[in-house]
């Protein structure tokens, strides 16, 4: 084959390689998967390092919060530490579900909810700082556990993943309602944050339900409650 024939053959072959049904989708898929995992790793590092920034201003009460005594400060700090752990888990859950789904609409919904959960994370971190309290020392463990559960649920199906969101938000909303009952009456700053978080969580659950969530089996719901109770009891002190 002479040089001109070789050039013509390459030109004829090249378009099939570039535009073929096999090469382009595989390259795009690999690149997207790597990007998703890098984004998840970046979010995990930011979450655990306390580098999250809220897009919305921290909720503040209309009235000025009164000074807290030592006992009230300790109680508020413990409850807000538990709430902060909940937001650590929320970040892990949504990031795992983003990795698991290929549905563009569902990804957009998870991303929007995750951004609002980032607000919650930053707000609770700020309140802990104001109370001169630290976050849970077990946050890496909580994050890893929630990420694993979210990834498994997402791999099963989108409807199961959404069902997990519905049940999680239902439990979190009830948990936040109990904190509104337990927080010192004088701690208006913490109460304002928790109230806004409660409203946001209720909306996230309703959106997941409307998106096609399936009801989780009773044993799964019971296991989720047991795990949440263990986490809450531990984070209250650690």
Image: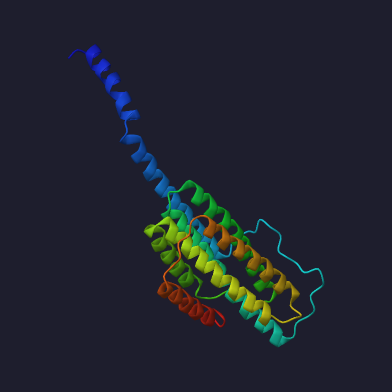
Name the spot of residue 190 as percent of width and height, x first: 70, 73
Pick the front one: 121 or 129: 121
Does 85 sit left or right of 15 as displayed?
A: right
Place residue 6 in its image quadrant: top left
Q: Which quarter of the image is occupied by the C terminus?
A: bottom right
The answer to whether residue 52 is visible is no
Q: Which quarter of the image is occupied by the N terminus?
A: top left
Q: Is residue 90 placed above or below 40 in the rendered structure?
A: below
Q: Residue furthest right?
A: 63
Coloring applied to the structure = rainbow
Name the spot of residue 73 as percent of width and height, x first: 70, 82
Q: Residue furthest left?
A: 1
Q: Is residue 11 placed above or below 40 in the rendered structure?
A: above
Q: Residue furthest bottom?
A: 71
The number of discs equals 0
Does 129 sit left or right of 141 as displayed?
A: right
Place residue 65 in its image quadrant: bottom right
Pick the front one: 207 or 7: 207
Name the spot of residue 32 as percent of width and height, x first: 42, 45
The answer to whether residue 173 is visible is yes
Q: Name the residue rendered at 67%, 77% in the picture.
A: 180
Q: Name the residue rendered at 43%, 76% in the picture.
A: 223
Q: Is residue 238 placed above or below 102 in the rendered structure?
A: below
Q: Is residue 79 placed above or below 43 in the rendered structure?
A: below
Name the spot of residue 94 as percent of width and height, x first: 50, 59
Q: Name the residue rendered at 35%, 29% in the picture.
A: 19
Q: Name the residue rendered at 75%, 82% in the picture.
A: 68
Does 114 sit left or right of 159 as displayed?
A: right
């Amino acid at each position: 084959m002479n040089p001109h024939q070789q050039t013509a053959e390459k030109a004829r072959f090249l378009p099939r390689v570039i535009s073929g049904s096999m090469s382009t989708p595989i390259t795009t898929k690999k690149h997207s998967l790597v990007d998703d995992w890098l984004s998840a790793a970046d979010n995990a590092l930011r979450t655990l390092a306390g580098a999250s920034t809220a897009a919305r201003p921290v909720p503040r009460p209309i009235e000025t919060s009164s000074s807290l005594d030592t006992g009230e400060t300790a109680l508020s700090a413990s409850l807000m530490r538990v709430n902060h752990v909940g937001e650590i888990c929320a970040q892990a859950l949504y990031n795992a579900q983003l990795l698991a789904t290929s549905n563009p609409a569902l990804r957009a919904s998870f991303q929007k909810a995750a951004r609002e959960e980032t607000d919650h994370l930053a707000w609770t971190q700020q309140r802990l700082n104001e109370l001169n309290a630290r976050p849970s020392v077990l946050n890496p463990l909580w994050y890893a556990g929630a990420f694993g559960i979210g990834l498994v649920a997402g791999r099963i199906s989108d409807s199961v993943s959404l069902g997990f969101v519905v049940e999680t938000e239902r439990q979190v909303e009830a948990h936040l309602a109990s904190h509104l009952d337990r927080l010192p009456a004088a701690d208006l700053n913490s109460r304002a944050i928790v109230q806004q978080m409660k409203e946001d969580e209720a909306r996230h659950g309703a959106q997941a339900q409307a998106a096609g969530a399936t009801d989780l089996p009773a044993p799964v719901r019971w296991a989720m409650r047991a795990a949440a109770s263990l986490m809450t009891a531990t984070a209250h002190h650690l």
